[in-house]
Image: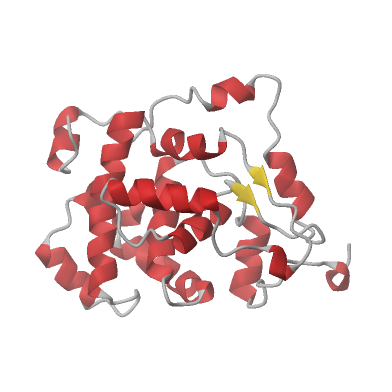
Amino acid sequence: MTRAAVVRCFWARDPLDVVYHDREWGVPVRDDRRLFEFLLLEGAQAGLSWVTILRKRAAYRRAFADFDPHRVARFGPRDVRRLLADAGIVRNRAKIAAAVANARAFLAVVAEHGSFASYLWRFVGGRPLQGRRRRRRDVPAETELSRALSADLRRRGFRFVGPTICYAFMQAVGLVNDHTVDCFRYRAVARLGRPSSSSSAAAMRRPRSAIARRPVAARAAAGQPK
């Protein structure tokens, strides 16, 4: 396939967008730390372009403890002041406060469900939804499912998780394959969502997250229920 023959989704124009689109977007994510990363970054994006966040991604990784929810959950006023002075990230007090609150809510979900992935993937029955979008206008900004996820996350104390943010999150971490059918990544990502002969049941019986396996004392220090 020559460079000229490659067809991508309509939004992948900036070089950073292209790399992200080709390597990450829509690939199913079941690792809790990666899920926390995308949840934090999608919330930071609110009102901004995704490429803006991609340009700041490395700075976010440094500023937010390599996206470790335990460490972020322990952030206090001094950390908030540090983050507000960090020109590498979006210096919005509400978004920074939400990131800390979301880390604590994230750990509570892990405590309840064994992993955030187990909780999240139940919304789609453990398997990615295949959007089969033909045109740009076929790709929704939100869906009934993203509204349900948003409502449940808000009930659990998460912030900056409106239905549109939740749908972008679902697209990013592969709960839905929203590559348009003419995109060169559509078939490859669709194949990643096909279960093997034994994976359907296993997907719903995933082992407890490494986050959940931390000692009780460490979880309690992060504000997580024992």
Q: Viewed as shown, does residue 144 lie left or right of 34?
A: right
The residue at 45%/59% (across/down) is 163
Residue 216, how many percent across, how many down? 18, 29
Which residue ends up furthest to the left in the rendered image? 77
Farthest residue, direction front: 144
Residue drawn at the location 67% of the way across and 39% of the way down? 193
Q: Is residue 119 left or right of residue 190?
A: left
The answer to whether residue 69 is seen in the rendering is no
Could you tell me residue 157's position as x and y percent? 25, 50
Relative horizontal placement of residue 216, taking residue 91 as reference (left or right): left
Q: Position of residue 177 (x, y in %)?
A: 66, 51
The quarter of the image holding the C terminus is: top left
Q: Quadrant of residue 87?
A: bottom left
The one of 115 and 124 positioned closer to us in this rendering: 124
Residue 25, percent from left and from top: 61, 57
Residue 218's image quarter? top left
How many tags in the picture?
0
Drawn side of residue 79 relative to residue 38, left or right? left
* Vertical relation: 51 (above or below) 189: below
Q: How is the image coloured?
A: secondary structure
Note whether residue 202 is visible: yes
Give the position of the N terminus as an image quadrant.
bottom right
Q: Residue at x 49, y 70 (%)?
A: 54
